[in-house]
Amino acid sequence: MPKKEECIHYVRPVRDVLELLAGKWKVPLLVALAVRSRKFNELERLLEGITPRTLSKELKGLEVNELVQRIVCATTPVTVEYSLTAYGDTFEDVIATLRSWGLTHRARLLERTEPEQTTFMCGNLAE
Amino acid sequence: MPKKEECIHYVRPVRDVLELLAGKWKVPLLVALAVRSRKFNELERLLEGITPRTLSKELKGLEVNELVQRIVCATTPVTVEYSLTAYGDTFEDVIATLRSWGLTHRARLLERTEPEQTTFMCGNLAE
DNA sequence: ACCGGCACTATCCGCCAGGATAGTAGTATC
DNA sequence: GATACTACTATCCTGGCGGATAGTGCCGGT
């Protein structure tokens, strides 16, 4: 029978990662940067619907966690390049794990569903 | 250069899994049920701070996604046992992956930090 | 001098997850 | 008949995430 302390220690690092990925845009952002480095405006256009305010915040969060690096290029005008760090690359493996399980899960739910019923508590399967 | 459609298809299953784990209590709940099956009240006491309203909702969500099964026992009074399904067990592997990466990440951040500064954008390291 | 592009920051606001509190229904025990 | 236990449901309310909109500072082109 595990003690309360142990449970907390077990759950905490899991929550750390989930907080890292929390919000609408973290995953799209990491995926976009996994392909290649991008400028601020480029990301703004790529992730259509994101506001500069949100983009800025998300990038800063990922930077603090050392998944993303911000490099100012001495061009005229000055541009800023965002890219994954080597460490950020290791995180892509975690995302790949999530994606892999997510794919089979989606297939599983669709299999057990009549075509006309596509809305679940887990989100909209039709999306 | 990947097209927009492909990007959406890439990100969607990842978000599916994150939605599955969204909220304060899903992970503690799954961990508690991974140890053994539990009754409603038992979970209410175990996850201290959770309200019955929230517990009920979270359990229903996990049930719809077939990670958890609800079994009514014909005792007096009637009790209800919640437990992980075999499928739910496979999901524990995903949580283990998150936990593993989260542990090294936490260690990494603590390493690069003066002891007095414990609050990060990624959450509170001191917790 | 003006316009436009880049990289943001500042303010305000609406929505909703989840907390607080209370209530329901069935049974059993005192 | 009052209280207690199990397993919930119902209502109200608040904090915070993120959207909408606007503004800043710098530079280069015409």
Image (cartoon, coloured by chain):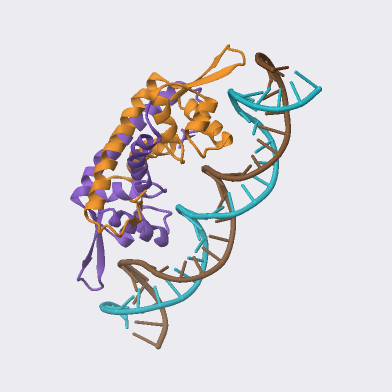
Chain colours: A orange, B purple, C cyan, D brown
Residue A11 picture location, percent across and down: 35, 41
Relative image position of residue B91 (x, y in whole percent): 25, 43
Q: Is residue D4 above or below residue B49?
A: below
Write the residue at 25% across / 57% down. Answer: A113
| Quadrant of res A120 | bottom left
The number of discs equals 0
Q: Nearer the viewer, residue B28 or A31?
A: A31
Q: Is residue D17 above or below residue B79?
A: above
Residue in front for this viewpoint, A51 or B125: A51
Residue at the spot 30% in from the left edge and 37% down from the top edge? A99
Residue, x 34% and y 24% (percent of image)?
A90
Residue in the picture at 20% in, 67% down: B73
| Nearer-the-camera pick, A98 or B108 | A98
Task: Kindly tell me whether residue B77 is visible in this rendering.
Answer: yes
* Quarter of the figure with residue A14: top left
Q: In the image, residue B50 lies at what x, y percent? A: 41, 55
- Image position of B17 (left or right of A38): left
For the residue pair A3 and A52, the one nearer the viewer reads as A52
* Residue B116 in sight here: no
Where is B58 relative to D7, above or below? above
Figure check: A19 above or below B24: above
